Image: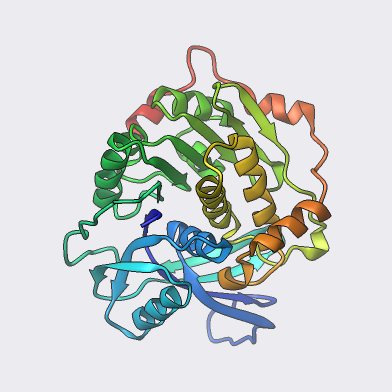
Amino acid sequence: MKALFIGQSYIDVTFVADSIPTGDEKTVARRYAVSFGGNAVTAAFACAKLGIAPDLIASVADDWLGRMFIDMAARYRISLHHRKVAESSLSFIMPKGDQRAIVRCRDDHYQHPFPILNLTGCRALHVDGHLADAALHYAKICQQADILTSLDGGGLRSNTHELLGFIQVAVVAERLCEQMQLSPGEMLTYLKSRGCRIGGVTMGAKGMLWYDETRSERFMPALDVPKELVVDTNGAGDIFHGAYVYSYLRESDAPWERHFAFARAASAHAIQHLGNEASLPSAEDVNVAHARFRERAVDARLVERLRQTKPGGAVTESARASG
C-alpha cells in the first residue's frame, strides 16, 4: 500500500441542459456523462490516473451501480475495501459556467464496521470526513506512524474539529468557512490552532489562501482558464486534492508550494471536461495546463479582505460550537 483514501462513493450523472423541468414537463440534455463520484473517491481516482494507484475504503452496495463502481476501481487498479451499504449513492449534477447544481441521494447507513487494514508501506492518508469513524481511526494511527495525513474540508462534518487534531495538511473550501462563520484568514488561524502543519482555503477562480511550512501566509492565484473553455467545475477540487497527494508521494521532500502548483494545473485541466472520469488528468495533461495558462492577476484588495480577521480572535463562539 502506497496511500489510503477514505470516503463516501457515488455514481455521478452529469448533464448539460437548458433547464430543469418542473411539474409535468420533459427536456432533453445536450450532453451527459456517468462516472464515479465523491470527494475522497474522486481524489483517489485522480491519484491513480496520475500514476500511483492507492487503496480506497468506500461505501459499496450489492446492486448494479455498486458493481459498476467496483469495475471502475478495478480499471484504475485501485485496491477497493468495501464498507457495505444497502443502496449505492447517486449525484445528479448540472454544471453552468463556474457553478453547478447538485441533487444527492445518499445511503450512509453502514451495515458493518470499517475494514482494518495493514498500513505497511503507506506514506499518505487522505480523508474527506465521511465514514467518520474510519477517518478518525486511521488519522490517529497515521499521525503516530509519521504518515502524512490530509483532509479535504469541503463541508462541516460531525468529526471535523476532532479530526483536524490529527491532520497535517488541511485544505478546506469556502463553504466550510461560511458554515463556521469564519473568513478565510480566520480559518487559517483556526487550522493552525488545531496543529495542522499546512493549511489552505480554496476559492475556485479566486485562488487559494494558505500557509506554508514556516506558518507564513501565502496566496496562490488560480490559473486563468478562459470562460469559453470551462465546461464543468464539479470535481475539480477533489482532483486538486488527489493531485497534491500524488505530487507528495512522488517527491516528498519538495516544498508544498510545488505540490499545490502541480495540483492547480490538474484542476485547470479538469474544468475543461464533462464528468469526473473525463476530467482526470495524466501527468502530461498537468504539464500542458501549467504551460498553457498564466496565473490570474492578483487583486491586492481582495487578498487583504480575505486575510482579515474579526477583533478579539479568529475563531468565533459559533465556530467552536460547530466543532
In the picture provided, is 238 more to the left or to the right than 233?
Answer: left
Rendered residue at 30%/83% (across/down)? 63
Can you say which quadrant of the picture contains the N terminus? bottom left
Rendered residue at 49%/65% (across/down)? 45
In the picture provided, is 224 more to the left or to the right than 191?
Answer: right
- Residue 193 appears in the picture as rendered: yes
Residue nearest the observer in this picture, 291 or 226:
291
- Residue 271 appears in the picture as rendered: no
Mark count: 0
Hey, which quadrant is residue 281 in on the image? bottom right
Residue nearest the observer in this picture, 126 or 164:
126
* Residue 9 higher or lower than 15, as above or below: above
Can you say which quadrant of the picture contains the C terminus? top left
Tell me residue 245's x, y (percent).
Answer: 51, 49
Hey, which quadrant is residue 318 in on the image? top left
Tell me residue 84's x, y (percent).
Answer: 24, 70
